[in-house]
Image (cartoon, rainbow, N blue to C red):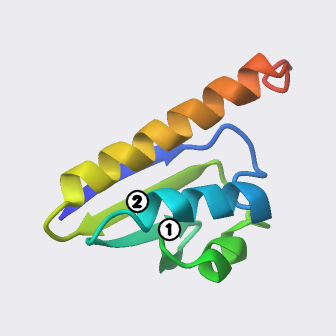
């Protein structure tokens, strides 16, 4: 099992469009993937599950993958969130 704690760039990280992109990343892997935010854990390959995480306030999520390609899955998820953070800041939304 491979786990990571990630910090979201913004509270909107699990609304429809970003959640769809996230599922596009996770569905490429055979491993089971779970995402937890504020104690609520959902299937990381389920768009509806991820949408349940959308209204929550915390910027910290826990990602867990288990399977043959778990390392690659968690690395891809980390890369996805790194890109999201960069785009968020480049668009000026990261300014206080």
In depth, the one of 85 and 22 nearer the eye is: 22
Residue topped by disc 2: 63
Residue 36 badge: 1
| SS at badge 2 | strand
| In the image, residue 89 above or below residue 37 | above
| Residue 9 percent location from the top left of the image | 67, 37
* Other-residue count near label 2 (Cα within 10 Å), few / some / many at <14 / 14–19 / ≥20: many
| Residue 80 percent location from the top left of the image | 51, 42
* Relative horizontal placement of residue 40, taking residue 57 as reference (left or right): left
Residue 93 badge: none
The answer to whether the residues at label 1 and label 2 have Cβ atoms under 8 Å apart is yes
Tell how many labels: 2
Q: Quadrant of residue 63?
A: bottom left
| In the image, residue 20 above or below residue 73 | below
| In the image, residue 83 above or below residue 36 | above
Q: At 56% across and 57% down in the image, what residue appears?
A: 22
């Amino acid at each position: 099992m491979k786990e990571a704690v990630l910090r979201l760039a913004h509270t909107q990280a699990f609304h429809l469009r970003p959640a769809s992109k996230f599922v596009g990343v996770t569905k490429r892997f055979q491993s089971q993937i779970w995402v937890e935010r504020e104690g609520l854990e959902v299937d990381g390959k389920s768009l509806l599950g991820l949408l349940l995480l959308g209204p929550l306030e915390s910027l910290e999520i826990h990602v867990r993958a288990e399977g043959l390609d778990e390392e690659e899955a968690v690395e891809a998820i980390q890369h996805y969130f790194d890109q999201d953070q960069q785009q968020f800041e480049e668009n000026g939304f990261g300014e206080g």
